[in-house]
Image (tube, rainbow, N blue to C red):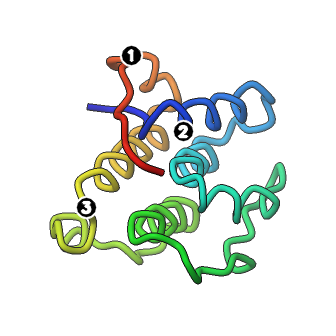
Amino acid sequence: MLQYRNISHEERFQELLKSGRWEDRTMLAALFLLTADKNLWLRMQFRITDIVIRFNDVKLTGISETGYCLLCGAKDLYFGSKKLCMNDLSDANIVNTEAFELIITAIAIKRYGTGVLSQTNRETVVSAE
């Protein structure tokens, strides 16, 4: 099921969409993942311009395992890299279920656009940030 992580995630991402600054689905997919984790977003939000995400400027100390998976997923979608391979995604010890679902949603955003979010069940998953 395509969904947000929680209400806070939805609010952060929807606020970005309201600005109308991003039309590129690759950028939107990466932003979807970066806004899913509050701590990650606080680190990344000032490293994003209209045309680029400066991933290398972020300090990773203190980031959660889920946050790190989301960051890797965002980088892979943005750069076309392969930090997370299929084996990683299929291994629950590497990528937990929550991160997996968010990454799959981001892949759908990259392929089809943000409309995939409005076509899904609008109930959000309640989880810790």
What residue sits right under mark 2 in the picture? 9
For image coordinates 59% across by 52% down, the residue present is 38
Q: Whole-percent x and y of residue 85?
A: 29, 73
- Marks 3 and 2 close (CB-CB < 8 Å): no
Task: Give the CA distance from mark 3 to mark 1.
Answer: 25 Å
Q: Whole-percent x and y of residue 37?
A: 53, 53
Q: Amino acid at mark 2?
A: His
Q: How many marks?
A: 3
From the viewer's perspective, is the residue at label 3 or at label 1 nearer? 3
Q: Residues within 10 Å of mark 1 (few under 14, many from 20)?
A: few
Label whose residue precedes the other's in the sequence (3 or 2) = 2
For image coordinates 27% across by 66% down, the residue present is 95
Label whose residue precedes the other's in the sequence (2 or 1) = 2
- Marks 2 and 1 close (CB-CB < 8 Å): no
**Secondary structure of residue under mark 1:** loop
Q: Amino acid at mark 1?
A: Gln
Relative to 45, residue 55 above or below: below
What residue sits right under mark 1 in the picture? 119
Picture quadrant where residue 87 is located: bottom left
> As rendered, which of 41 and 32 lies closer to the eye?
41
Picture quadrant where residue 117 is located: top left
What residue sits right under mark 3 in the picture? 96
Q: Residues within 10 Å of mark 3 (few under 14, many from 20)?
A: some
- Marks 3 and 1 close (CB-CB < 8 Å): no
Task: Give the CA distance from mark 2 to mark 1.
Answer: 17 Å
Task: Give the CA distance from mark 3 to mark 2.
Answer: 18 Å
